[in-house]
Structures are given as structure tokens and as C-alpha cells.
Amino acid sequence: MFDTLSDRLTTVLKNLRGKGRLSDADIDATCREIRIALLEADVALPVVRQFIAQVKERAKGAEVSEALNPAQQVVKIVNEELIGILGGETRRLNLAKTPPTVIMLAGLQGAGKTTLAGKLAKHLAGQGHTPMLVACDLQRPNAVNQLQVVGQRAGVAVFAPEPGNGVGDPVEVARRAIEEARRAQHDLVLVDTAGRLGVDEELMRQAADIRDAVQPDEILFVVDAMIGQDAVTTAEAFRDGVGFTGVVLTKLDGDARGGAALSVRHVTGQPILFASNGEKLEDFDVFHPDRMASRILG
Ligand code: GDP
């Protein structure tokens, strides 16, 4: 991820080195190159436009600095603007004042929700929480079983539908799971919901019904970074259909160009909280915009 973008940005910025003073024409030329690099990385056009406008304005108005030469100043501005489009500060999970904290996962089938449920549960258990996973994906035949396996690997409890647990009705399963979490004193509940291959109304309605039944403290939209620009369209559909409070990017280990990662925050207005970068439980990280920006700038 980001390899090509990273290479291109490094080259563009390297070309500025050694220049004593940057003319407006130098800055315009650099911004043109950055714009091409971002578009080739599949970053959404409105994001590219705003990014370039900001960099240009700041670079042209940059104060003469004693500490930084002109090239370093441009690198600093690009870095700060990258951090900005990635969300600025690291955003922590919202925890409920009165447990259990309810976190609902939504997204397309194959986005990596079930895998993420295990990763997040393990991560949170490591911080002293006592999470319970809830299997509300009753569409995909093997999904409940998959969540049970993931839960076992992560060493956390799984609430799955069985006689008396609202078999067949995800809303009822979710409701009962919250009751069970209170009874068994789990301070955190992670609700895995059904995804479809494409966005559809029934999926949205079901997710919205689960949301209304359990009133989550966080709704995390899980999105495969490999789908590029489609991530933006999917995010918009989920924002309008269900609403979400945060984003999780998955498959950052793939060779995608990075456009989704760079666009989704700006386009949806919601922060990226976590990143998933592999199939194993430990391939998971809290998302830090500043670290990601440093990675992009190489
Ligand atoms: P769900 O349908 O949204 O629940 O998606 P799954 O959790 O079942 O994941 C779909 C596929 O993507 C599985 O084969 C996972 O092993 C794989 N997967 C999930 N997260 C990642 C990731 O971060 N990197 C890679 N390479 N594969 C992932």
C-alpha cells in the first residue's frame, strides 16, 4: 500500500532540494506533480482539489524560516496536510458511561468484518476489557460459525443464535446479547452484522433495525481499502442508510494504491479508528494519522 504514491511524492519533493528560494512557478509545478501522484493513487477528486489548494496557498505564503530551507518547508506542509486529510488527531473509541459499550460493525460482505471483530476483541481484551462478540450475520451460511472460531482464537465470549436466542432474527439476537452482556458483566459488546456483495436496501434496513434496537456507542463502517474509489461510494451509501461514527480500513497489506485510505475521512466526515493489515489476529493497529502520513512520505 502507498508504495507508488510514496515513491512519487518523495521524488517530487526531492527535486526541490538545493533550491535557495522557491518561486510561485516552482510551487505550481510541484503541486501539479503532487496532484498527478494523488490522482494516480485513486484519491477522490474533491480530496485532491482541496489538498492541492491548501498546499499551494500555504507554500506560497510560507514565512522565511531560519530552521527550514524552502524544500523542507514544503515537505512539512505536505506532511501536515496529509495528516489533516487522514483525520488529524488519533481518535479513540467512545466508551459508554454505563457498560456495556456497544460497538456495531457494518460493511459489505467480504470487507473483513468478522475477522476484524476478532482482532478488535483481542485488542480490547488486552486493554482489560471483557468483550463479547455477537453473531448477527445470519445471511451467510457459515458466518456464525466463522465468528465462533474467531472468538475462540481471540479468547473471548461469543453470543450466537440458538433456540431461545432469537434464531433467524438478527435484531432479536442483538437485543438478547445486550441482556446477556449485562448479566455476565461483559463491559463491551461487538455486534457483527450481515453484509451483501453490493449495497442493497434490505441490508441497510436490517442494519438500521439492529442499530435502533441496541443503540450503539459506535457504529464502525468496515471497508476494504483494495476497492479504491468504490470505497467512497459504499461509504456514502452506508452513511445515508445506517450512519456511522467511525471507519475501519482493512487489507492495508494489499497492493492497493491507497486512494480509499486517503479519501474516506474527508468524504464521509468520520474518522478512521483502526486499520487491519493481514489475515492473522495480530495484523491490526489503532490508526494514527501522523504515522500514516510519515509512511506515505517515506
Ligand atoms: P466479512 O464478510 O466482512 O465478515 O469478511 P471476513 O472477515 O470474512 O473477511 C473476508 C476475507 O478477507 C477473509 O478471507 C479474510 O481472511 C480476509 N481478510 C480480512 N481482513 C484482512 C486483511 O486485513 N488483510 C487481508 N489480506 N485479508 C483480510
Image (cartoon, rainbow, N blue to C red):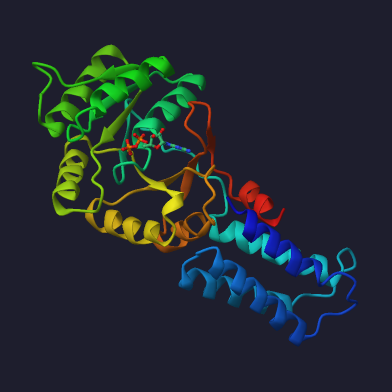
* Residue 67 in the image: above or below residue 249: below
User: Where on the picture, by quarter, is residue 214?
Assistant: top left
Give the farthest residue toward the front: 255
User: Where on the picture, by quarter, is residue 151?
Assistant: top left
Residue 196 vs residue 265: left or right?
left
Q: How many marks?
A: 0
> Is residue 243 in view from this perspective?
yes
* Residue 205 in the image: above or below residue 179: below
* Residue 22 in the image: above or below residue 82: below
Location of residue 72 in the rendering, given as x and y in whole percent from the top left corner: 81, 65
Residue 293 vs residue 237: left or right?
right
Image region (quadrant) for ligand 1: top left
Location of residue 60 in the rendering, given as x and y in whole percent from the top left corner: 73, 80
> Is residue 186 in view from this perspective?
no
Location of residue 39 in the rendering, given as x and y in whole percent from the top left corner: 54, 70
**Residue at the image position 28 percent from the left and 38 percent from the top:** 216
* Residue 34 in the image: above or below residue 93: below
Residue 76 vs residue 232: left or right?
right
**Residue at the image position 24 percent from the left and 14 percent from the top:** 183
| Depth check, front residue: 122 or 84 | 122
Location of residue 35 in the rendering, given as x and y in whole percent from the top left corner: 60, 73
**Residue at the image position 36 percent from the left and 32 percent from the top:** 96
